[in-house]
Image (cartoon, rainbow, N blue to C red):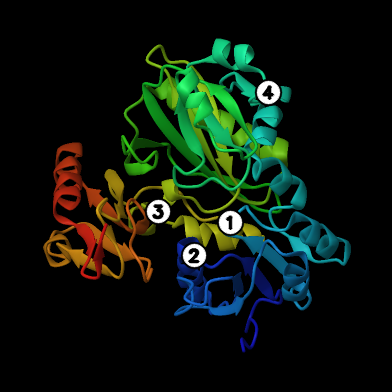
């Protein structure tokens, strides 16, 4: 069993042990931190790097038992048992971000209400009730979003016709009006307990056309200085309004006219910050520990003029133990860094890792991004769908 931290007084527990937990643990090792992770998967990605308690972070009793000997509890996933965290807070445990923040952000409909009620620009939305046919049809075109539990494109569906409405799942959700998206931008902000903040430069996200997840992102984002400043200002205001501690990722839609909409938030390390591991003075994962332990925040200055992150996802026709094609070719390319999550099974469009890419110019960056996308393939020798 974990012996606890050797320098920092707080004994820390993290709910979730997937790929974000893996990279949290890797960053924690720099300071010989020994956090414990709660995850239902006996083969959780974090397992080779951190002590894992096997259990369901959505179950009240399991979370209570896990938190009993902890001083500080945080998350790498939002879909956790909030009631247990509230009761642990009442016992004097520190929960970061606080349960008030988690309650708002883990439910996308509550997120939307929070944004609307506090004056943040967000696309119009409508609670989805399948019985209100005329109201739903009048709201189209739209996207249906699942209130809770959606991730990596799951829980989001385009709705343009009565047939699309009939095909929606029975999960609670809402319709979000389709807006004219020119670019999708994300800003990651760190905030410690002293309310000090550091903001990573905005990134431009390019989405996979069929899977509704990020194919790659790049920074600097190719947007005007005024739009960049607006996104940064909105992210800072959101972090302050939530009075949160830790990391907050804010995703934006930018219309061709320059109109900026807040899309969604995540109160933890985020896919949009993975490039920071090699490309910035402080990675988002070290910044996470600095923020939740209330330490001085690190510099968010870039080391290289241009950087990118490419999600390495399972090929659409393969399911089974992963086989990585093109790994050697990509590793031979200067400025390309491969991060694999150690997942035992690949599935179509499942995130299996990512590549961070650094370059001196956008031309060089784009060449390397294309090379990785064309050469790195994740298949399986076991089964073919």
Q: Secondary structure at mark 2?
A: loop
How crowded pointer 1 is (Cα within 10 Å; few <14, some 14-19, many 20+) is rated as many
- Measured as percent of width and height from the top left, residue 182 is found at 36, 21
Q: Residues within 10 Å of mark 3 (few under 14, many from 20)?
A: many
Lower position in the chain sequence, tag 2 or tag 4: 2
Q: Closer to the camera: disc 3 or disc 2?
A: 2
Res 230 visible? no
**Badge 4 is on which residue?**
116
Residue at disc 1, secondary structure: loop
Above or below: residue 51 compared with residue 274: below
Label 1 vs 4, first from the N-terminus: 1
Q: Which residue is mark 2?
A: 18
Residue behind mark 1: 77
**Dot 4: within a 10 Å radius of its alpha carbon, few (fewer than 14), some, or many (20 or more) residues?**
some
Residue of label 3: 274
Q: Does 26 sit left or right of 139 as displayed?
A: left
Instruction: State the residue at coordinates (67%, 22%).
Output: 131
**Which mark lies nearer to you, 2 or 4?**
2
Q: Residue furthest right?
A: 90
Q: Are marks 1 and 2 in contact (CB under 8 Å)?
A: yes
């Amino acid at each position: 069993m974990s012996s606890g931290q050797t320098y920092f007084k707080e004994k820390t527990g993290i709910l979730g042990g997937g790929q974000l937990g893996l990279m949290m643990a890797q960053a924690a090792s720099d300071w010989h931190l020994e956090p414990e992770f709660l995850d239902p998967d006996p083969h959780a990605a974090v397992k080779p790097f951190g002590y894992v308690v096997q259990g369901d972070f959505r179950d009240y009793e399991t979370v209570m038992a896990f938190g009993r000997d902890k001083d500080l509890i945080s998350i790498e996933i939002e879909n956790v048992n909030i009631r247990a965290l509230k009761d642990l807070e009442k016992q004097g445990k520190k929960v970061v971000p606080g349960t008030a923040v988690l309650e708002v952000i883990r439910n996308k409909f509550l997120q939307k209400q929070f944004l609307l009620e506090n004056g943040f620009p967000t696309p119009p939305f409508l609670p989805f009730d399948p019985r209100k046919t005329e109201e739903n049809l009048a709201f189209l075109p739209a996207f249906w979003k699942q209130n809770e539990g959606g991730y990596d494109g799951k829980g989001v569906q385009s709705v343009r016709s009565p047939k699309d409405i009939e095909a929606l799942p029975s999960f609670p959700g809402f319709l979000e009006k389709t807006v004219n998206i020119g670019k999708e931008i994300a800003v990651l902000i760190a905030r410690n307990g002293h309310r000090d903040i550091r903001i990573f430069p905005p990134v431009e996200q390019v989405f996979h056309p069929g899977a509704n997840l990020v194919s790659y992102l790049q920074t600097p984002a190719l947007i005007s200085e005024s739009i960049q400043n607006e996104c940064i200002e909105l992210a800072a205001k959101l972090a302050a309004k939530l009075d949160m501690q830790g990391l907050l990722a804010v995703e934006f839609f930018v219309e061709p006219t320059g109109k900026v909409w807040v899309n969604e938030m995540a109160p933890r390390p985020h896919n949009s910050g993975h490039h920071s591991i090699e490309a910035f003075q402080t990675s988002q994962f070290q910044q996470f520990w600095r923020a939740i332990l209330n330490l001085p925040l690190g510099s968010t200055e870039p080391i290289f003029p241009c950087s990118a992150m490419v999600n390495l996802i399972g090929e659409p026709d393969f399911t089974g133990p992963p086989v990585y094609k093109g790994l050697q070719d990509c590793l031979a390319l200067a400025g390309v860094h491969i991060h694999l999550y150690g997942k035992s099974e690949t599935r179509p469009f499942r995130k299996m890792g990512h590549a961070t890419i650094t370059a001196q110019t956008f031309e060089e960056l784009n060449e390397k991004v294309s090379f990785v996308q064309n050469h790195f393939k994740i298949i399986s020798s076991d089964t073919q769908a």
